[in-house]
Image (cartoon, rainbow, N blue to C red):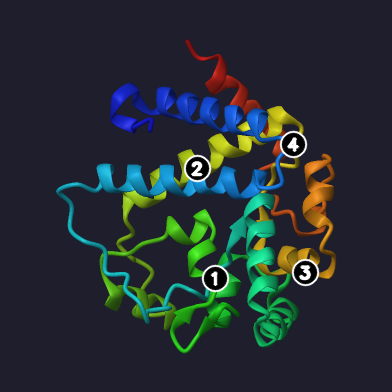
Amino acid sequence: MPLMNDSGPIGFFKSLHADFTATLTERQNDEDLIECLLEEAFGRFEGNVNAQAEGLPSVACREGCATCCTIRVTATAPEIILIANHLRASGAADVMQRLADADNATRGLDDLERMSLGRECPFVINGSCAIYAVRPLACRGHASYDERACISALAGQDDSVPLSSPHLMVRSFVQNSMQSALRDAGYAWGAYELNQALRLALQDEDQGEAWKSGKDVFADALVGEISLREMGQTFDAIKAHA
């Protein structure tokens, strides 16, 4: 497993990119391509967060705390397809209706508007996450050192939540290097608003195969604060760095 401390940030990105590229090449014709890719991504995230957080205080996040689950979540196409498959397998019809209701209420809202609305993620049921095992990197990478600060921010009283830098940093490196590898391999590699994209995925069981064929099946849910062109240029500059 590549570790950030071994070769610095650029070396870490390039090592992750090379590993994701190898997986995409070796598994391109396998039915479990998406599962293997994300098993690698989630494993890289967990291992490196643990290494980077060594000696730091423990985060306050715990089971039953869903205070931050009012913010907008973005995810890559493989993550969305994995979650959609998980929901189909669990037969969670009630969750699917909650997803539709949440999407109708939040579509088009930015991060601040979303938090101000205070609407909880549709997958949080009785304080527990129904998709915890397959939650996207965005959720894994958002961790706080102070639960009271999170509650205060949600109430609009304070916005100075002490987030874990290791979680944010490692999530960014893992997700961006995976996106870069997806881009080079010819797959749609953007980041999509989770609720809207999941509704699209659940409407058609063939979306996974369509994505594997190179189609941008979740284009309508693309989040565009940073253009794909700019992101691609950044990825290319990092890969070209000696």
Of helix, strand and loop, which one carries label 1?
Answer: loop
Specify the amino acid type for callout 1.
Ile
Q: CA distance from mark 4 to mark 1?
A: 27 Å
Counting from the top left corner in percent of width and height, residue 71 is at 53, 70
Q: Would you say residue 76 is visible in this rendering?
A: no
Q: Which residue sits at x=60%, y=73%? A: 113
Q: CA distance from mark 1 to mark 3?
A: 14 Å
Closer mark to the observer between disc 4 and disc 2: 4
Q: Earlier in the sequence, mark 4 or mark 1?
A: 4
Q: Which residue is mark 4?
A: 29
Q: Which residue is mark 1?
A: 131
Counting from the top left corner in percent of width and height, residue 155 is at 42, 83
How would you rate the neighbour count of disc 1 (Cα within 10 Å): few for under 14, some for 14-19, many for 20 or more? some
Q: Which residue is mark 2?
A: 40
**Mark 2 and mark 1 in contact (Cβ < 8 Å)?**
no
Specify the amino acid type for callout 2.
Glu
